[in-house]
Amino acid sequence: MSELLRRRDVVARLLDGRGELLVVAGLGSTAWDCTAAGDSALTFPLWGAMGNAAMIGLGLALARPERRVLVVTGDGEMLMGLGSLATIGVQKPRNLAVVVIDNERYGETGMQATHTAAGVDLAGAALACGFAAASRIRAAAELDALRAAIHGGEGPLFAQVKVRAEKLPLVLPPRDGVLLKARFRRALLGEAADLE
C-alpha cells in the first residue's frame, strides 16, 4: 500500500491555477489548508457552522449556475452534515464538486477517530444519494483527473481523499465573518455587491 497523501499538498494541487473557481472551505483544517494554498477573495472559509459547508456550496451553486463551485471539507464535518448529500443529490447542481479531505480524525478536538476510520464510505453514500460521480482517492496520480473534473466535469461530483492524520501549523484566514462575507460578495458580484 502506498503512503497516504498530505492534506496541504492535495489542496494546493486542487487549487493551483484555480481561476474563477468559487471555494467554500469547511470549518477548521480545510479552511487553513485553503488559506495555505493562497488566500483568495473567492474562497469563503467557515469559522462556524460545522456540518454546513456542503449546504453553503449547494446554495452558491444553485444561485450561480454559470460558475464552478468547490466545497473542500473534512470527514468530521461531512459526517455531521451527511443529510446534505441527499439534498445535493436531489437538486443535482451540475457545477458543484465536494471534496472531503479524510484523515479519519476530528482534528480540532483532539484527533479522535471519526467513523471513516471504522470503514464508513462517504463516496458510496454520495453515489447512493444521486451524485453523478464519486471516488475514493489514495494516490497523487489520481489528483489531476479530480482537478479536471472539478473544473469541467458534470456534477454533482464527490471525492473522498484519504490523507495522513497529522497536525500542521495553522495558516489562518481572516477571522472577521463580516469581512469574509463582504470580501467574497465583492469578488463574486463586483460593484453590484455594494448595491444589494
Image (cartoon, rainbow, N blue to C red):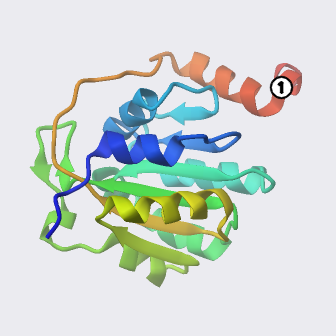
* The residue positioned farthest toward the bottom in the image shown: 128
What's under tag 1, amino acid-wise? Gly
Against 31, is 154 above or below?
below
Q: Nearer the viewer, residue 129 or 160?
A: 160
For the N terminus, the image quarter is bottom left
Question: Residue at coordinates 67% horizontally, 71% vertically from top-left?
Answer: 154
Are there few (<14), some (14-19), or many (20+) residues within 10 Å of tag 1?
A: few
Q: Position of residue 28 (x, y in %)?
A: 33, 35
Against 171, is 44 above or below?
below
The part of the image, by quadrant, that contains residue 90 is bottom right
Residue 52 in view here: no
The part of the image, by quadrant, that contains residue 102 is bottom left
Q: Position of residue 81 (x, y in %)?
A: 40, 58
Question: Residue at coordinates 73% horizontally, 57% vertically from top-left?
Answer: 62
For the C terminus, the image quarter is top right
Q: Position of residue 85 (x, y in %)?
A: 48, 68
Residue 181 relative to residue 192: left or right:
left
Residue 3 relative to residue 183: left or right:
left
Residue 48 relative to residue 91: left or right:
left
Question: Residue at coordinates 12% horizontally, 43% vertically from top-left?
Answer: 111
Residue under label 1, please give it.
Answer: 190
Q: Nearer the viewer, residue 24 or 82?
A: 24
User: SS class of the residue under badge 1?
Assistant: helix
Residue 164 relative to residue 24: left or right:
left
Residue 7 in view here: yes
Q: Position of residue 57 (x, y in %)?
A: 59, 50
Q: Nearer the viewer, residue 104 or 19?
A: 19
Question: Residue at coordinates 51% horizontally, 54% vertically from top-left?
Answer: 54
